[in-house]
Image: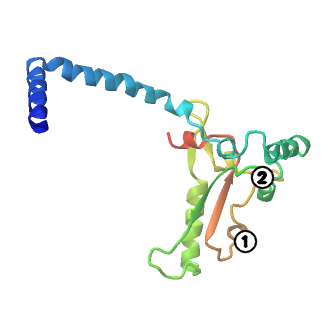
Amino acid sequence: NFAQFLRRRFGRLGGLVGAHPWPFLLLPLLLSGGLGAGFFFLPQRQANDIEGQFTPLEGPAKSERRFAREHFPTRDSERFSGQRLLTEGAFASLIAVSASGDNILTAGAFAELLRLDRAVQSLAVPGGDPGAQLSYPDLCVRNNGSCSSPNPLLAAKVIPLFSITYFITITFSITSCLR
């Protein structure tokens, strides 16, 4: 009978584990530690290039983008235009909603939105050099030498629409903000 066969085999295995427990305890721990050490190298091997993963290797879109970059360089640090970006870029978006479910297009909600805007623009992240801090004016995209407004409606001090997008020049990686 198959059940008796399994009972005898597992009984012998249990006797072996009971008689010699250290190999059954240490071998899995050492094996897990050795294989788990490979996770240390995982961030270096991750492929995060969406274009490289999901478009043909020698597709026409890549060669056309390369041609546009070589022959029509943009100076986003001087004259930024979101419509001229050849890639998505690095930016963050905040969507403001009313916590109470009331209308967000009120003067009180707009004052809160301006307070949120000041809080975002006063954030600082660790810079490339030890002890250095990068603030919003260091990272913002520029148009004619000054930071582009994240939302023209905020700059004009009128009641805004719902979404504010903060464009940031690609001078740092998002992972440096998460440290």
Q: Quadrant of residue 118?
A: bottom right
Horizontal and vertical percent position of residue 42:
50, 32
Horizontal and vertical percent position of residue 167:
68, 54
Against 101, residue 44 (above or below) is above
- Give the foreground label among 2 and 1: 2
Which residue is denoted by mark 2 in the rendering?
85
Which residue is denoted by mark 1 in the rendering?
156
Q: Residue at x 58, y 57 (%)?
A: 120
Query: Which amino acid does the dot numbered 1 rest on?
Result: Ala
Name the disc covering residue 29, or none.
none
Q: Quadrant of residue 96?
A: bottom right
Q: Nearer the viewer, residue 55 or 114?
A: 55
Q: Nearer the viewer, residue 128 or 131?
A: 128
Horizontal and vertical percent position of residue 59:
78, 44
Against 69, residue 154 (above or below) is below
Decide which of tag 2 and tag 1 comes sooner along the chain: 2
Horizontal and vertical percent position of residue 35:
38, 25
26 relative position to 46: left or right:
left
Q: Residue at x 59, y 80 (%)?
A: 105
* Residue located farthest toward the right when viewing the structure as drawn: 71
Quarter of the image for the N terminus: give it. Answer: top left
Q: Quadrant of residue 156?
A: bottom right
Query: Which amino acid does the dot numbered 2 rest on?
Result: Leu
- How far is disc 2 from disc 1 in space, using C-alphas? 25 Å
Which element type, helix, strand or loop, lies under badge 2?
Answer: loop
